[in-house]
Image (cartoon, grey):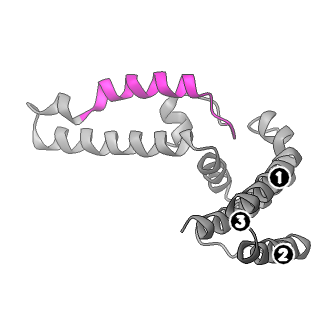
Amino acid sequence: MNYFELFDIPVSLRVDKASLSKKYFELQKKYHPDFYTQSGEEEKSDALEKSSFINKALKTLQNPDETIKYVLQQKELLEEEEKYALPPDFLMEMLELNESVMEEEPATVRQKIDVIEAELYAEIQPIIDNYKEGITTTGDLLKVKEYYYKKKYLQRILDRIDG
């Protein structure tokens, strides 16, 4: 069972938070380990496992980047620890951005990153907003994958600034 089936919501690159929260509380009422304290060991273990799965699913679906990653993995378009080749022009831009980390104030670099992220998101926002299971093309999902890796790269720069 995947996370979307668990929460009984449609597969989406942008999850409806209200539906997610409502279903989460329903599932926790049903499977929270505290409700199984008087049960046998097998039932306790099963409830703990289900509750853990529910919590992991919630954490993933609440985070837009993790939701994108999860959907791409479900579609077998993204692998854990994949060596994704970003376009050379983007890498050159990142080289310049990395140099500015040494020369400029962190707030200025953050502003630059915000602008880049907004531009990147604007390119794939229609795909994310209009995602339909079985209709959205693999080509569109590959564009989302590239966005995911570019955003991940930008996050590493931000982590360096904050670190």
**Are discs 3 and 2 less than 8 Å apart at CB?**
no
Residue 114 drawn at (x, y percent): 76, 52
Q: Earlier in the sequence, mark 3 or mark 2?
A: 2
Q: Which mark is residue 16?
A: none
Q: Decide whether the magenta segment is chiefly helix, strand or loop.
A: helix
Q: Residue at x 22, y 36 (%)?
A: 33
Q: CA distance from mark 3 to mark 2?
A: 15 Å
Part of the protein shown in magenta: 12-32
Residues 159 and 129: in front is 159
Q: Residue at x 78, y 78 (%)?
A: 99
**Residue occupied by mark 2:** 96
Report helix, strand or loop for mark 1.
Answer: helix
Q: Which mark is residue 105?
A: 3
Q: Neighbour class for label 3 at 10 Å: few (<14), some, many (≥20)? A: few
Q: Amino acid at mark 3?
A: Glu
Residue occupying the far right of the picture: 89
In the displayed structure, 73 sits above or below 101; it is: above
